[in-house]
Image: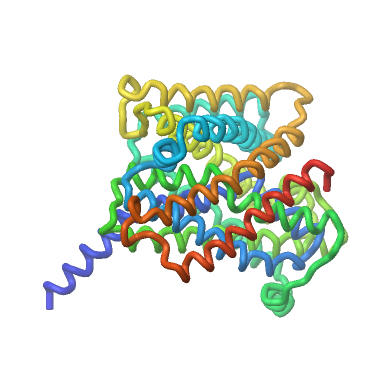
Amino acid sequence: METPRKFEWKHILFILGIIGPGIITAIADNDAGGIATYSVAGANFGLAMLWTLIPITILLIIVQEMVARLGAVTGKGLSDLIRENFGVKTTFFIMVGLLIANLFVTVSEFAGIAAAGELFGLSRIILVPFTAIIVWFLIVKMDYKKLEKIFLILILFYFAYIISGFMVKPNWGAVFKSTITPTMQFNKSFIFLIIALVGTTITPWMQFYLQSSIVEKGIRKAEYKYSRWDVIVGSSFTNIISFFIIIACAAVLFSNGIMVNDAIDAAKALEPLAGRYALYLFGGGFFIAALFGAFILPLSTSYYLCEAFGWESGVNKKFGNAKNFYIIILFMIILSAGIVLIPSINLIYLILLAQFINGLILPVLIIIILKLINDRKLMGSYANKRWVNMITWTGCALIIIASLSMLVVTIIGP
């Protein structure tokens, strides 16, 4: 009887060694901008948008699964594959667009850190530089396994939003009904927020980071079935968090007629209505979300730029062996933190510009991923099956429509 038990424990430990990239990538997308979007959706429209999280989760799983499969089968990052299969020119334009978009998103992460700190009486002049130094130090000093453990620990803090959702004691019958019953309001603000929910959940940088993480962790075909579950669990959990953020803001703010513009407004408004602990949980969760993004965005940017131009990359390498990789990360951290410290900087404009650029890139990137995943010379038996392609193209067509709509709405304004 001992032998099967030992085998089972080894099997479990093996699986635990594989998981990480899918969960980390999906949860990291619940960054400062994502938390703000879900907070506004709940506060301004109540439970009306809960149903959208089901198709959004399915679409996220579809795209992330394809990217993880590409990494496990080819052993290459997405930038590598784009350069090899679509040429240097296409790669260059995508990389430039992503660099600009990711820089502005990283700025929003440090802005989120500053805003959350001020919520608890901490000066951004001290907090932002201190956080930037900590982020840089940990990235340089730790290998991938240690850094991944830090990321997985940070994920635990996202449970603050789930706790907040239960603390406000929502009408669970109404929650269930809103989750399974699609409703639409045909006004610009409502449609803009639905598009924003898709845009903040499925972003270009995620695809590059996930595939690079799969490759750096050394996950190959034999382990892929476990990575697929890593992706499914991560994509599901990230939208469970979104679900409870919307519930908390709907139950307390929407029901009291309080509209907000961002997550910090929501945290402040929760305190007099739901108590100081709600402020701590919501504001603290926002800080961790922004901190998580401040780690992941520079890393993601450096990964795909180094892959695209054939430079050495990876946190497992020493600074001297991957100078360009670490210099890009340092550039992203210093510039983003510095911009946040500029008095009267228009951060909203920068965030909208990042969304605009991501909206341009995402449809192109999705088509490229679909072409790669269906290339049988590249993927062999791991290429998409016909029926999977039908579902995938339908889902990705919806993503493309949402992305293009986001461009239009961003231009004309919500």
The residue depicted at 40 percent of the width and 33 percent of the height is 307
Q: In this view, does 332 lie to the left or right of 33?
A: left
Q: In which quarter of the image is the N terminus?
A: bottom left
Q: How many labels does the image show?
A: 0
The part of the image, by quadrant, that contains residue 124 is top right
Q: In this view, does 397 lie to the left or right of 328?
A: right
Residue 339 x/y as whole percent: 66, 24
The part of the image, by quadrant, that contains residue 322 is top left
The residue depicted at 61 percent of the width and 62 percent of the height is 56
- As drawn, 409 above or below 99: below
Residue 89 x/y as whole percent: 51, 30
The one of 140 and 1 positioned closer to us in this rendering: 140
Visible residue check, residue 305: yes
Residue 326 x/y as whole percent: 42, 25
Visible residue check, residue 72: no
The residue depicted at 67 percent of the width and 76 percent of the height is 180
The one of 150 and 123 positioned closer to us in this rendering: 150
Q: How is the image coloured?
A: rainbow
The part of the image, by quadrant, that contains residue 304 is top left
Q: In this view, does 80 lie to the left or right of 409?
A: left
- As drawn, 92 above or below 193: above
- As drawn, 289 above or below 330: below
Residue 53 x/y as whole percent: 64, 64
The one of 343 and 77 positioned closer to us in this rendering: 77
The residue depicted at 85 percent of the width and 55 percent of the height is 188
